[in-house]
Image: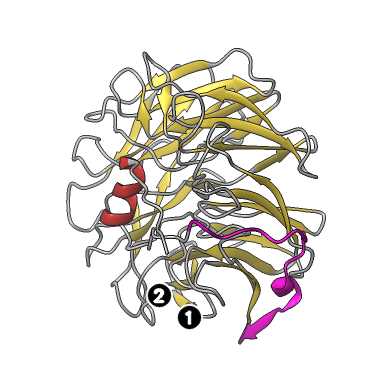
Amino acid sequence: MCYKKIDNPVIAMKKIALVAIVIGLFAACKKSDTTTPTNASNVTTSGNLSNLFSFTGSDGGNPYGDLTYSSGVLYGMTQYGGPNANQYGNIFSINANGTSYTDLHDFANTDGAYPFGDLVLSGGVLYGMAVNGGASNNGTIFAMNTNGSGFRVIHTFSGAGSDGSQPTGSVIVIGSTLYGMTTAGGAFQAGNIFSINVNGSNYRSLYNFNGVGTGGNPNGSLTLSATGDTLFGMARLGGIDSGGCVFSIDTNGTGFTLLYNFGGVSTNGSTPEGNVVLQGHTLYGMTSAGGAHGHGCIFSLNTNGTGYTDLFDFNGSSTGGAPLGSLVISGSAMYGMASTGGSGYGVLFSIGTNGSGYNVLFNFAGAFGSTPTGSLILENNLLYGMTSLGGANSEGMIFSYQL
């Protein structure tokens, strides 16, 4: 019996400093020849939550990111698993009712490895990033058709010069251009913001984080303004008070502005891991640490950097702790997940946009998931998400929650 060892420092940092995710996976697993594993239609429920699919390792395992929904089909990635000896992760699709799980692509390291983020769908093409792999093992940007055909690497990160490396977030699509961030590399080795055409041409490093005053090591993704010319995001570290920051930047790479610095006082949060979400002129987000109890907080902030409000502080136990994903907003309600707390394995929660009415909707445990590290999506009054551990095989699961 042998175990796989992950040597990447970014992966080690995220797992040790933020949440204890088991990284020892069996390397000798082999994927079944069928594209619909036997547990794909074995949906189990607990209250309003349904376990749609439990990963086995050979068909993917330990998903870290989010799902993407299109016409009744969910698309996503797993961080590990797949048939390759080193189990570099995979891309999959599954019907929203839990049937017809299909392994669309297995990463082979040369084309990427260990994806943390999620996929974005544009014009029938899925775009995403892998944190490792590629020619210099610094990660890749890739594209693939929704049926699994036409997989292609459109950029290999080098980490040299102003090029970034080790992207842990996702790209967004604006017209024919992809925008994203890397958590390392760049001119100061603290990550960068980049743009690239969807065909892989015209890669540009728009901004290089310096790891200090302007922030550094962003793990999330960018959010586009309603006017379509400004990007908002968060850096995990750095900023004036060294607890990370919220920033804005024009899509052409000019006008970088620090909107808010975390870490100055105990009640304002620190170490943001996910994205900010935009409603009107207000940004909403979470931090994985800091806050009144040291276990993270939910906040709001005006897009001009004024009006920061600490909406809720996680207590690390009954209300959860260490949220690593982002919020989803529906009207005056927000939904999210915390990776720890509750019954001990993380929670799914709701809260009003004004900070009132925090409610734990579900406590993850055992066969019904453990350690949710990504975000939720909302479709047809159902929340869909994944847990990185737990499920029937302790390799993570895909779930839905009926509102």
Instruction: List x then y, in percent, for residue 308.
Output: 34, 49
- Magenta stretch: dominant secondary structure: loop
Q: Which amino acid type corresponds to the residue marked 2 in the rendered image?
A: Tyr
Q: Is residue 323 magenta?
A: no
Up/down of 276 relative to 48, above or below: above
Instruction: List x then y, in percent, for residue 156.
Output: 52, 24
Residue 339 visible (yes or no): yes
Circle 1: element type: loop
Q: Are marks 2 and 1 in contact (CB under 8 Å)?
A: yes
Instruction: List x then y, in percent, for residue 302.
Output: 43, 43
- Residue at (29%, 48%) from the top-left corner? 13
> Which quadrant would the C terminus be assigned to in this image?
bottom right
Q: Which image quadrant for residue 267? A: bottom left
Q: Is residue 36 magenta?
A: yes
Q: CA distance from mark 2 to mark 1?
A: 8 Å
**How many C-alpha atoms fall within 10 Å of the one at disc 1: few (<14), some, or many (≥20)?**
some
- The answer to whether 341 appears left or right of 53 in the picture is left
Report which residue position mark 2 lands on.
345
Instruction: List x then y, in percent, for residue 178.
Output: 61, 27
- Residue at (69%, 20%) from the top-left corner? 199
Report which residue position mark 1 lands on.
366
The residue range painted magenta reads 27-47
Q: From the viewer's side, name the closer residue of 259 and 47.
A: 47
- The answer to whether 66 appears left or right of 356 in the picture is right
> Which quadrant would the N terminus be assigned to in this image?
bottom left
Up/down of 364 relative to 4, above or below: below
Circle 2: element type: loop
Up/down of 347 relative to 207, above or below: below
Q: Which amino acid type corresponds to the residue marked 1 in the rendered image?
A: Gly
